[in-house]
Amino acid sequence: AAGVIQSPRHLIKEKRETATLKCYPIPRHDTVYWYQQGPGQDPQFLISFYEKMQSDKGSIPDRFSAQQFSDYHSELNMSSLELGDSALYFCASSLTSIAAGETYEQYFGPGTRLTVT
Amino acid sequence: DAKTTQPPSMDCAEGRAANLPCNHSTISGNEYVYWYRQIHSQGPQYIIHGLKNNETNEMASLIITEDRKSSTLILPHATLRDTAVYYCLLPPGGGADGLTFGKGTHLIIQP
């Protein structure tokens, strides 16, 4: 079965540079989520999009922005990178029924490991 | 999200059943209990969820107490590949909300 695809898998940037991470959800999934996991920490929710509209917002820094495109893929843009941004970034997708008020299982990608030097 | 409490770590012998407890005494009537796991440096993986009835799928069984204040995830025949951090979550309803990962249980399967 098709899974969530993330690219690139590894990325090395210098401080103050910008980075763009891409996420391709499971086909027919309409919701994308972004999570950040620092070394030795639990995953932390950043932001989600449902049908190309921002749905929920977590602890996403103002230097980061994201969007979901018409083909449902999503990009996380990170500017003015800091050493503390070094982390694993996971994208997840789900098929969401907003009207039903239910929460559906999220399927995670393999992650992008960002190293800021 | 409502709060959950899990033991920080557990050991289990390979081939035996692993029983992972979770306390969620403040759960509300319409909140589901979800379980995810994360094998080292991989993306979290959905395991199972339930509302009030016990549930079983190809990966695990979920036992929820009648008062819904606690639950147990059961891996019936644990293998070395089941070594992971297991998270018990109570995600809010409404669809596209992010998950709040607390301090899960690090399950170590011993050969």
Image (cartoon, rainbow, N blue to C red):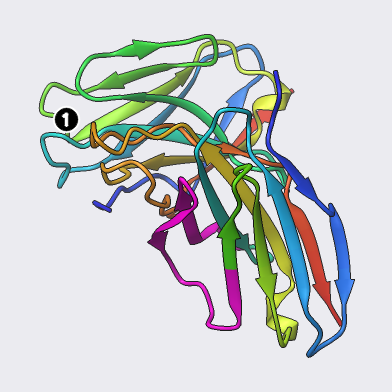
Question: Residue A58, located in which quarter of the rendered image?
Answer: bottom left
Q: Position of residue A27 (x, y in %)?
A: 63, 28
Magenta stretch encompasses residue A52 = yes
In the picture, residue A113 is in which quadrant? bottom right
In the image, is B31 to the left or to the right of A114?
A: left
**Could you tell me the amino acid type at mark 1?**
Arg
Give the camera-side residue of B93 and B24: B93
- Residue labelled with disc 1: B68
The residue sitting at 40% across, 35% down in the picture is A96
Q: Give the extent of the magenta segment.
A: A41-65
Q: Number of callouts in the render?
A: 1
Find residue A93 and report its horizontal and vertical position in percent. 55, 40
Please state the horizontal and vertical placement of residue A4, each as a whole percent of the image. Answer: 68, 37
Quadrant placement of the N terminus of chain A: top right
Mark 1 element type? loop
Q: Nearer the viewer, residue B20 or A32?
A: A32
At 23% across and 42% down in the image, what residue appears? Answer: B24
Q: Looking at the image, which residue is at 61% across and 17% down?
A: B78
At x 28%, y 53%, the residue is: B1
Query: Residue A3: where, in percent of width, then height?
Result: 69, 30
